[in-house]
Structure formats: structure tokens, C-alpha cells
Image (spheres, rainbow, N blue to C red):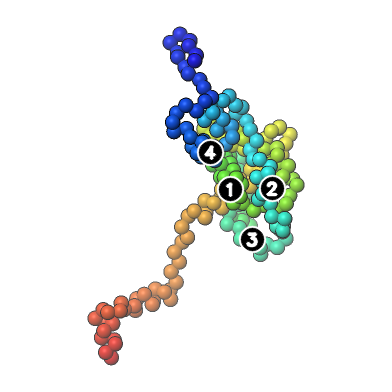
Amino acid sequence: MYVNGGLLMYWSHQFSAPWQTEQWREQMREQLRHNAYLRLIENQWVSTESDFLPIEWCDRCIDPAARLNLGDQRAFQVRECRFDPYQMQASAQRLLAQGIPMVEFPQTTGNLTEASSNLYELVKFNNLVLYPDAAMRLAVQRSVAIESPRGWRIAKEKASHKIDVMVALAQAALGAVSEASEPAPLNISDDLLRRMATFVAPGSPEWVRRQMY
């Protein structure tokens, strides 16, 4: 119990409400990042900075048989290439002229929060396949999550650390998931249109007339 002038506050780490069951707490653990769970559910003081991803989660997603092969372009169907327009506008224009589908993805708080959260969920539930790569694994270990009132995002543990590959992976994964959630376009061929124009429903007068003749 804390009293200060007109302020009366009860602070406890115990679960006293009847609906705060173990099942509910486990559900909250699944939905929230570790530090967010401690702060919001267990009412504990925590840092606004924490590891972005447990390295063991990433190791689960690695397929030892997977290989990166940029030499064979036939193995890839590039739908879009996301980039931060802040420092890559000139390069993006040159690539666009070469037929690369360049898509601007400004590194705003909203975009980074959405991309970071999406990558976190994919790795957490083992819905992402990665090829073995020592540099990428090191980048995971050097990445942290910075929380703010507007959400959280991937950041560096130290200014000298390189985590560009993690930011790029988050952007690409968000693009893939976003496109998969959109309905596929309905393609109607000319042949189908012709057949639809001459279609006669079974049982209709025209269908009966054609059966007679």
C-alpha cells in the first residue's frame, strides 16, 4: 500500500482477481513479449529493451538442407523489393529501370512495429524456414526490441553492430504475409467467356428444346 497526499495505491505481484487463473496467465505469456508480460501482468519493473528473439527459436527454423543460390534466377519469382527511400532512392530508380519491382517502405515507427511484430510471430510459431548462415545468426543475437508507447521495433544492441539483415528479413516477411492474405485476382479467359455466353441451364425451356431436336 502506498499513500502520498491524495494518492492511494495498492501495488502487488500476487494474482488476487478470480479470473487471473493459470490458464489465463499462460494465454498472456503466449500473446505478449516476455518483458511486456512481466510489466503488464506481473506488475514488475522491467527495462524497455530486451532481446528481440531467443536464438533457440531461430535455430528451430533453420533447415540444414536449405541453400541460398542467387546464381539461378529461375528459382525466384520476385514480386517486390522493399527499400527505405531515405538513403536508397537513386539506387531504387536504377533498379526500377532494370525491371525490378521496387516498393518504398519508409522506416517509420508504425512500419517497423508491424514488420518486427510479424517476424516475431513467424519465428515464435516456427512458420519461417531459414537457411544456415552464421552472419544472420550473429545479427539475431545482436538485435534487441525497443518498446515505446507507440509499439516496439528492432534495434541494435550497440551502435557498431550490423543488423541490416534482420531489418531486411522483417520487411520481406511482412510483404510475403501481406500478399498471401490478399485474395487472388480472378482471371477469366476469353474461352470461358464464350462458353458462358452459350451456356444453357439444365431444365430450362431452351435446354428442353435442344433435347427434343
Label 1's element?
Answer: loop
Q: Work out how far the residue at label 2 is from the one at label 3, CA to CA, in angstroms.
A: 24 Å
Q: Work out how far the residue at label 2 is from the one at label 4, CA to CA, in angstroms.
A: 24 Å
Residue 66 shown left or right of residue 41 in the figure: right
Q: In the orientation shown, which residue stands out farthest toward the right? A: 134
Q: Residue at x 47, y 26 (%)?
A: 16
The first of marks 2 and 4 along the sequence is 4
Residue 108 visible in the current orientation: no
Q: Residue at x 59, y 51 (%)?
A: 127
Q: Dots 3 and 4: beta carbons under 8 Å?
A: no
Residue 24 — which label? Answer: none
Please state which of the two labelled residues, at mark 1 or mark 3, is closer to the viewer: 1
Q: Dots 2 and 3: beta carbons under 8 Å?
A: no
Report the amino acid beneath label 1.
Phe
Nearer to us in this view, 18 or 108? 18
State the residue position of label 1. 125
Label 2's element?
Answer: helix
Label 3 CA crowd tier, 10 Å (few <14, some 14–19, many 20+): few
State the residue position of label 2. 59
Q: Position of residue 109 (x, y in %)?
A: 55, 36
Report the amino acid beneath label 4.
Glu
Q: Residue at x 72, y 55 (%)?
A: 64
Label 4's element?
Answer: helix
Label 3's element?
Answer: loop
